[in-house]
Amino acid sequence: KPINVNEIIKAVCNYYSVKTVDIKGKRRTKDVVVPRQIAMYLMRDLTGTPLISIGELLGGRDHTTVMHGVRKVEEEIQQQEVKTRQDIANIKQTLLM
């Protein structure tokens, strides 16, 4: 079944125990930034949603902010960051159930 962006946000929030309000909010503490960037990456990866739309969904962020978030996660995956890769695999599994 096709996955929509709201399902991704919900799955990421559940996985990291963060509120949707926080992911879409202005706070930039690490406990919120990491899930937000993972959400950006998954939205781009699984739905191909345009960067501008992802930014709007996540509290009116600029598309360059989304680009940075997606790139950061991609770099962590390439650098064999075990936690990042595991988190993404777990969230994808949740979404595909």
Image (cartoon, rainbow, N blue to C red):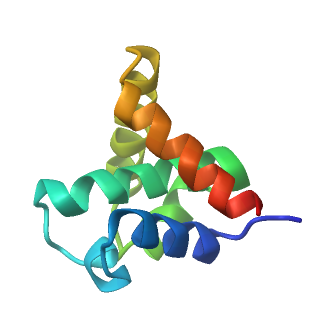
State the image coordinates of residue 69 (x, y, percent, origin top left): 36, 44
Determine the image quadrant of residue 77: top left
State the image coordinates of residue 84 (x, y, percent, origin top left): 39, 36
Q: Residue at x 32, y 51 (%)?
A: 65
Identify the residue at the far right of this view. Answer: 1
The answer to whether residue 35 is above or below residue 27 is above
**Is 67 positioned to the left or the right of 46 in the image?**
left
State the image coordinates of residue 27 (x, y, percent, origin top left): 14, 70
Say if residue 8 shows up in the picture: yes
Say if residue 49 shows up in the picture: no
State the quadrant of the N terminus.
Answer: bottom right
Figure label count: 0
State the image coordinates of residue 70 (x, y, percent, origin top left): 44, 41
**Is 59 positioned to the left or the right of 70 in the image?**
left
The answer to whether residue 46 is above or below residue 14 is above
Q: Residue at x 52, y 54 (%)?
A: 51
Q: Which of 81/5 is in front?
A: 81
